Image (cartoon, grey):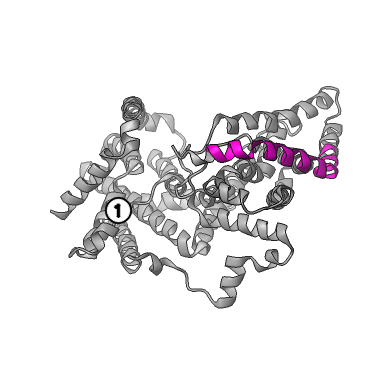
Amino acid sequence: MLVTQFLSHQWKQTKRSSIWQRNLAVNLIMGFFFFILFAEVVILAIYISDKWHEIFTNGEPISVYHQAVAWYFAGMFTMRFFMQKLPALEIRPYQHLPINKSHLIHFVLVRGALNFFSLISLVFFIPFAIFQISYYHGTSTAWIWLFGLLFLDQAINFLVIYVKKQMVTNLKIVAIFFAVLGTLALVEYLGWYSFSATIAGFLDYILIHTWLFAVLPIIAILLYALNYGYLKNGMYLESFQPKTSREDKYLSGQFGLLDRIGLIGELISIELKLQLRNKRTRSMLMLAPLFLGYGLFFYPQEEYGSESGFMIFIGIFVTSILSINYLQYSFSSEGGHFDFLLTLGLRMKDYVSAKLQLSTVLIIASYVITIPYIYFGKTVFFTNTACFLFSMGIINPMILFFATYNKKAMVLTKGSAFNYQGISAMHFFIMIPVFILPIFIYLPFKWFGNPTMGLIVLGALGLFGLLLRPWFIKNIVDNLYERKYIMAEGFRDKS
């Protein structure tokens, strides 16, 4: 059978890989710990499912569970999008052979349906079907309910595959999906509309009218067919190229406005192309909504206090994490062509200035997006403003200075989820002064009863740092001249 041969080829490719042989012992150890962790999760799921009706006494237990299921699938969509690898099969060796394309595509999609996240769903749903659904509604209904939710899980899986494929050609679809999810979460949090209650009501209704569960496998099959058609039409790489007009191609691909403002503008244009065209950097950029929404978890909590030192940490995080991520990997992301950059005769001052200016744009954009946090109080707004100024004036040049000590090239063709390639201890070391320094500056003023003055000092230091930017650039350039050959030698080592 072709499926057996495909599986055999995939296994041989994995087993013969030098990475597999080099990390065999590590993989075995990690597998052992994963087995222990998985066993503990299974035991916990069984215990919670058995005691669910005792844990949630307010309201109908199954309806409460269905509300949890609604947000489980919303969270699962987000986790699959950022962490799940797309099902891939190296099809080029097969394309010249007399093999039907549909066989390859079906294999890719079916194999993509069997993954770690599907296993989580089995652990999440099976115990509840046994201990709760079968008890209240009978065994046959429990089986129908279980298979219905597993088909719904696969529908989410195929939807993620389709949306991630659309990242190649149409980012608008991705933006729409996450805008809808973010809006649903916001209105549920504000109490305007309950997305989870609506889904729970639907699941409660079809649990009584079990024939309606037939809708769920139909949804999964339709999404499977959607992916099948998309992959079949895009079997060859050029099929995935978006159709754009000549003018759109110039504006989006060449960043014409930037190219017209001088050498620094051209360098910024190249940086933007690198960030948007490569999988590693693009996937890090797609995490931006999660980073910028970090404050939603802490600003509403009264126990943290709007004037606590922890709020400074949150302010730095939500306003600066994008620029920090960009700057600390700015040299390593160019490791594949760093030798070429050294031979261009570029002035290092222009090279460094372009990176700092792009990071300034990122931090300004992040700050503007976080302005609605004023909903949680003026103190939150002033804290974010002070952290924004401090980051722009002090933290950004400090991060870029420390980035010159990184000498591990980053492979840009791989995603960022669970990928630590190109990341060294230096990246974690950098985070210590970035988040600790502004807290140490702010806390003495708070202890002496004047937290407002602490925010003013933070903002003033940031503005002073902007005035000193030429001095910062000079020090970064001097350090880069001193270390550029050490960095280039390190970037050549791809192990």
Q: Position of residue 67 (x, y in %)?
A: 44, 45
Q: Nearer the viewer, residue 377 or 190?
A: 377
The residue where tag 1 is placed is 89
Above or below for 412 versus 129: below
Above or below for 16 versus 42: below
62 in magenta: no
Task: Describe residue 353's horizontal placement relative to residue 27 as left or right.
Answer: right
Segment tinted magenta in the rendering: 461-490
Task: Describe residue 371's horizontal placement relative to residue 16 as left or right.
Answer: right
Q: Main secondary structure of the magenta part?
A: helix
As helix, strand or loop, the secondary structure at mark 1 comes to: loop
**In which quarter of the view is residue 103 placed?**
bottom left
Residue 304 shows in this picture: yes
Q: Nearer the viewer, residue 260 or 446?
A: 260
| Residue positioned 46% across, 61% down in the render | 168
Q: Nearer the viewer, residue 52 or 284?
A: 284
489 in magenta: yes
| Residue positioned 60% across, 44% down in the render | 331
Task: Describe residue 460's horizontal placement relative to residue 215 as left or right.
Answer: right
| Residue positioned 64% across, 38% down in the render | 403
Residue 188 shows in this picture: no
Label 1: how many Cα within 10 Å (few below 14, some 14–19, many 20+): some
- Give the residue type at disc 1: Leu
Q: Position of residue 406 (x, y in %)?
A: 59, 36
| Residue positioned 29% across, 59% down in the render | 92
Q: Position of residue 219 (x, y in %)?
A: 33, 60
Quadrant position of the C terminus in the picture: top left
- Find the residue positioned furthest to the left: 1
**In which quarter of the view is residue 309 placed?**
top right
Q: Nearer the viewer, residue 398 or 122?
A: 398
**In which quarter of the view is residue 122 placed?**
top left
